[in-house]
Amino acid sequence: MKINWFPGHMKKALREMKSMMSNVDIVLYVLDARAPLSSVNPSLNNLARDKKILFVINKLDLADENRVKVLTQKFKMQNSDCVCLTSTMSGASKIVKNKILLLSKDKIEKFKAKGIKTTIRVIVVGVPNSGKSTLINNLCGKAKTLTGNKPGVTKGMQWLNIGDNIEICDTPGTLYPNLSDQNVAKKLAFIGSIKDQIIDCVELSSELIEILLQKYPLLFEERYKGAKSLDEIAKIRGYVLSGGEMDIDRTANAVLDDFRKGRIGRITLD
Ligand SMILES: Nc1nc2c(ncn2[C@@H]2O[C@H](COP(=O)(O)OP(=O)(O)O)[C@@H](O)[C@H]2O)c(=O)[nH]1
Ligand SMILES: [Mg+2]
């Protein structure tokens, strides 16, 4: 199975985002804590290269905190900052706002000296399903954008006022034309950044099982009572088709769903 997903709407979104960049002060780059390195998108890096970047490593509640802490160091570079958080929790908003104000301190003070209150414009980018819209809703204090646990929920772009003279823009999740590293592509598929319909779920699920058995054997064993393959999991779950055969499709989807909802445990694959 070769995974690649770069539909026309992503190409269009990247083009639109590029044309907006001259009006943007900060790029808020949302990564998934279950695969922070794999959810970096070269096309977005390219877009953000002259901007201040605030990396938000999101979905910390689903991830392996120790591993995330190590990976966070990779995102602390000049002109950028990095925070790890859970967008669905109320404290997230304050953390992000403070970081935005800190990163734009120079601009705010420059205008203040002239007696002008300036607006800070923040564009929120990231691969599909990383939690961009959820974070924005949290920053707004109410549901202003549509969210959903699958890629492709956000379609258009809109500027929203989040107070403290900060305006923020949601964008559709974007990938890049060629997912040449298939290990990265698989991780993006595991975390739900790639449309499930274009993937062979049995193959994907089998690969996830192999990786989890290697990286998190104890969590896996506990969840599936020692079962180590789709067949064995189907057996203990009693997922049987009418002819008596194991229902492998159902089992594959159940394992992917368990992982995505954090039911196997807190896991980071990078
Ligand atoms: N557990 C958990 N789920 C989250 C978090 N942030 C977002 N989500 C969920 O992830 C899914 C995708 O979120 P959404 O904001 O639509 O992602 P977007 O495609 O990047 O805009 C939704 O089901 C959210 O509820 C988080 O910090 N923790
Ligand atoms: Mg969205």
Image (spheres, helix red, strand yellow):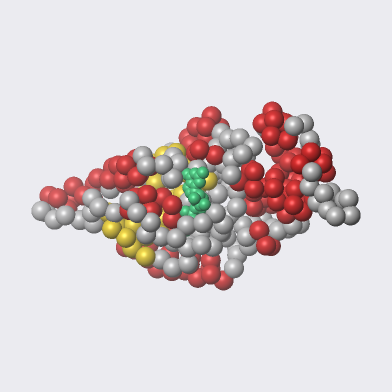
Q: Which quadrant does the C terminus fall into? A: top right
What residue is shown at x 70% (from left), y 58% (from top)? 199
Percent from the top left, x then y, of residue 55?
Answer: 43, 45
Percent from the top left, x then y, of residue 36?
Answer: 54, 43
Asked if residue 173 lies left or right of residue 267, the reply is left
Instruction: Name the outermost residue toward the front.
Output: 242
What residue is shown at x 51% (from left), y 62% (from top)? 153
Number of labels in the image equals 0
Q: Nearer the viewer, residue 259 or 35?
A: 259
Q: Nearer the viewer, residue 32 or 218?
A: 218
| Residue 243, picture quadrant | bottom right
Percent from the top left, x then y, of residue 169?
Answer: 37, 60
Asked if residue 253 lies left or right of residue 90, the reply is right
Asked if residue 101 lies left or right of residue 43, the reply is left
Percent from the top left, x then y, of residue 102?
Answer: 28, 42
Question: Can I make out residue 225 in this image?
Answer: yes
| Residue 103, picture quadrant | top left
Question: Can I make out residue 103 in this image?
Answer: no
Q: Which quadrant does the N terminus fall into? A: bottom right
What residue is shown at x 69% (from left), y 47% (from top)? 254
Q: Nearer the viewer, residue 256 or 236?
A: 236
Asked if residue 40 lies left or right of residue 254, the reply is left
What residue is shown at x 58% (from left), y 35% (from top)? 266
